[in-house]
Image: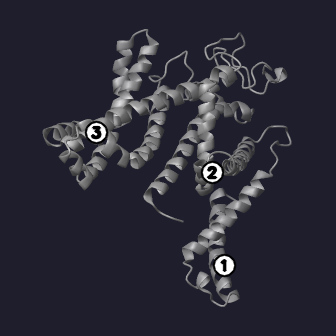
Amino acid sequence: MSVWLTLLIALAAIAAGGWALRFAGQKLTGNKPVFRDMPYAVAFGYVLGAAVLVFAVWYFFQPTMTEQGTPVAGVMFFRWAVQAFIGFAVAAYLFRLLGRHVGTAGSRKMFRQMPLTASFGILVILIYAFLAVFAGVLAPYGQAEVFQQVNALPGGNAATGGNPDHLLGTDQIGRDLLSRLIYGAQNTVGIAFATTCLAFFLGGSLGFLAATLQGWFDQVLSRAVDVLMAIPSLIFALLLMTIASAWAGSEKWLLTVYMVIIIAVIDSTRVFRLARAVGMNIVVMDYIEAAKLRGEGLRYLIFREILPNATAPLLAEFGLRFCFVFLTIASLSFLGVGIQPPLADWGTMVRDLAQFINFAAFSPLTAALPLMAAGAIALLTVAVNFVVDWMLYRSSGLKE
């Protein structure tokens, strides 16, 4: 039986199951509103979710090795993903439980109101921050340290081409991959954080100035920002980084500085739009007019009146902007014009280790090497978005 025919039969069975669920629920509960008013699409979704869950449980317990001794990569990757999901969920729950009993009164109250997704996000961010700060202590070797054995397989088993001194193996020139993965947190996340701070300083300052001064100053800045925002950011950054690579020459560290400035300027346009929009709504308030009548200067208006009232949306935008900057840096590094060697970077690691995906049928752990760097990027992005969503929920004034 072909895969498509099996899929069609499964969808037909789920469709029939959705109708049967709604019909049986109406009859067994005396036509209660929960089943009487249930749309068919909702009943279909319930049955589809149950079918997916049953299939996932069945697939999870499939053997990881064939009778010939060949590993089944799909099952092994699925098991690792499920185990990681359960592990992170338990860790997030315990972290939230700890936060409810340890800390100041304000922090305990915050953890009591915090959903599990936000707890997960904060925990992941703290782990990444810990790795970034103490990478030099946690990494077994230096990020640029080269060893004689190249392309050592992960696992540390010498019989299968590994090395017990390098648990995740070595790359094509003999650098320890575990050390570079740890240093990647310091370089990628640290540079992304510094770039985001610079973008917010530029965009936020100019946005508040435009909202306060208005007139020709606002018009000039707004039209310049419109021009920059009309160009796709990644393509524009790639073009400017190509030019900057010619300026930097052999000074690789200078190219990283250029990258920070270029991405910060490009992303500051989005921050400018938000800061200007929020500032425009604040400058028309009565307390701003009262401050002007008292003779307060521009610095007082921006830092004492506008900024405190714009903190919530700016914090939420900071989290989102950090994700975009983080992904942009990883993309540029993947294309070869981002963070330069010998600095370790997750985007560069994905590019350099992508060839190992071809060995998934023989060694799933080897094929997982590029997925580790890509997963580190994706995990931090999801975690930051979870925290941003919670911050937006709190600042909106909504109640559960």
Q: Is residue 223 above or below residue 386?
A: above
- Going from the N terminus, do you reach mark 2 or mark 3 first? 2
- Going from the N terminus, do you reach mark 1 or mark 3 first? 1
Q: Residue at x 57, y 21 (%)?
A: 344
- Packing grade of label 3 (10 A; few <14, some 14-19, many >=20) is some
Identify residue type, mark 3: Tyr
Q: Which residue is mark 3?
A: 300
> Could you tell whether 246 is left or right of 368 in the image?
left
Image location of residue 67, percent across then percent down: 86, 42
- Going from the N terminus, do you reach mark 1 or mark 2 first? 1
Residue found at the far front of this picture? 294
Q: Which residue is mark 2?
A: 108
Identify residue type, mark 2: Arg
Judged from the image, the secondary structure of the residue bearing numbered disc 1 is helix
Q: Which residue is mark 1?
A: 21
Kindly report which numbered mark, 2 or 3, lies closer to the viewer in this rendering.
3
Image location of residue 1, percent across then percent down: 70, 60
In the rendered image, which quarter is residue 13 located in?
bottom right
Residue found at the far left of this picture? 216
